[in-house]
Amino acid sequence: MTLLLSAALLALAAWMWQREKKWRRRMERVTQAAGLRAFEADRLAARFIGLKEGNAALIKEEYLRRLFESLLHEIRQGVAIVDEQMRIKFVNRTLAHLFHKTAIQRGRTLIEELHDHQVTSIVQSALADQRRTVREVEITSASGLNGRGSRHFLIEAAPLPAKAERGAWLMIHDITEQVMADQVRKDFVANASHELRTPLTLINGYIETLQSGVLKDEAALQRCYDIMEKHGKRIIRIIEDMLAISKLENGSSALNLEPFTVRGCVQDALDHLAPMLEGRDTRIELDFPADGGHMHGDRFYWDQVFTNLIENALKENPNPGLVIKVGGRWYADHCVISVSDNGIGIAAHDLPFVFKRFYRGHKHHSPEIKGTGLGLSIVRRTIEAHGGTIDLASTPGVETTFTMRLPLHLQPASEAAEKSACC
């Protein structure tokens, strides 16, 4: 093996020497034809080699620059490089996308292109202090987002390395989703604490009353028991909602599929909500096929779907004259189920978020409305787990409609994902 390697190396060396010798002979003929001496020919050859190597270096540098710029265009953070006068020397496409601009022009200043003094001040601070500066800012539509609402950004800026020319680099991270998620978690902790504390406080109060022996009347005792039972069920409902959404989102609980009629499921939900309906001027209209609308799914989760949707309509619309319509249409391979009401509706700014976990509208129509904001998230996750979709349309004061489209030949979302992964 060593002999073969040595022979190969010798052959390579011989080939390179022959190539060099051939090249030098050609250079000698060229220099002789030009009337140059031998030492001048050597200098010319050296100059030629130097130019060739310099050109190769420039080509390599240009290739690396383009490769670097291509990579910067693909990252999720907005990146820019500016000179001392804040004029943009480089900017990636993401930065333009973050500020909802078709493009950002090089050669113009940051303030001219981004229209926000917060960004400029961070870069100026980094240049003045000659160190990395990081700040979290909120940029509103008036500051350059073209009416797209406020966004939260984490902005980093630092001066360019000492070997480079004077200037700074800028990186902008869009952290709006993280900020909103953090706020939702805080709201959930506050809401859940309140929702659990209230019934527990009432139950403890009635327990102390019973322990004191003050109540002797059987009717009064029974009323205490009923109230304690009511609030105990309320605590269980909150905990069940938390467990249900956790299982649906983590995929840790397989669907228990069984045949049932949707009309029967809706009727069970109405029976469960009978105490809320009692004494209210509310009309319930059911519109299903004669056979009740057959479905193959997890009855436990579908009970929660209809209970949550109807209960939301009742809680959000305490005024008389409420009409809740629940119906469905069955086709060859799918069905469309809708739940609608003629109540106060959902504000346009809340529509994109109502299915998010723990989300509750910022302005409620009644101080009596309670809940942790898990109901509609459970509804959406249940529909998706059954391979369907849900849409929401609301015209405040006219109609609010939840429309669910589901396949009749059910393939759960988890099984579909596994099949897709295998194939």
Image (cartoon, rainbow, N blue to C red):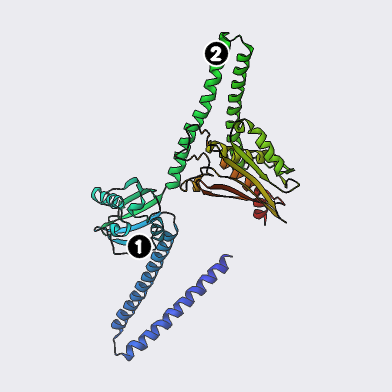
Q: Is residue 158 above or below residue 357?
A: below
Q: Earlier in the sequence, mark 2 or mark 1?
A: 1
Closer to us: 330 or 283: 283
User: Which element type, helix, strand or loop, lies under badge 1?
Assistant: loop
Q: Residue at x 37, y 67 (%)?
A: 61
Residue placed under numbered mark 1 in the picture: 104
Q: Position of residue 227 (x, y in %)?
A: 59, 21
Closer to us: 285 or 90: 285
Residue placed under numbered mark 2 in the picture: 208
Q: Position of residue 377 (x, y in %)?
A: 56, 42
Q: CA distance from mark 2 to mark 1?
A: 69 Å
Q: Quadrant of residue 421?
A: bottom right
Q: Amino acid type of disc 2?
A: Glu
Closer to us: 3 or 390: 390
Q: How dense is the environment of label 2, judged by Cα within 10 Å: few (below 14), some, or many (20 and up)?
A: few
Describe residue 48's horizontal placement relative to residue 191 as left or right: left
Q: Is residue 163 visible?
A: no
Quadrant of image for the N terminus? bottom right
Q: How dense is the environment of label 1, judged by Cα within 10 Å: few (below 14), some, or many (20 and up)?
A: many
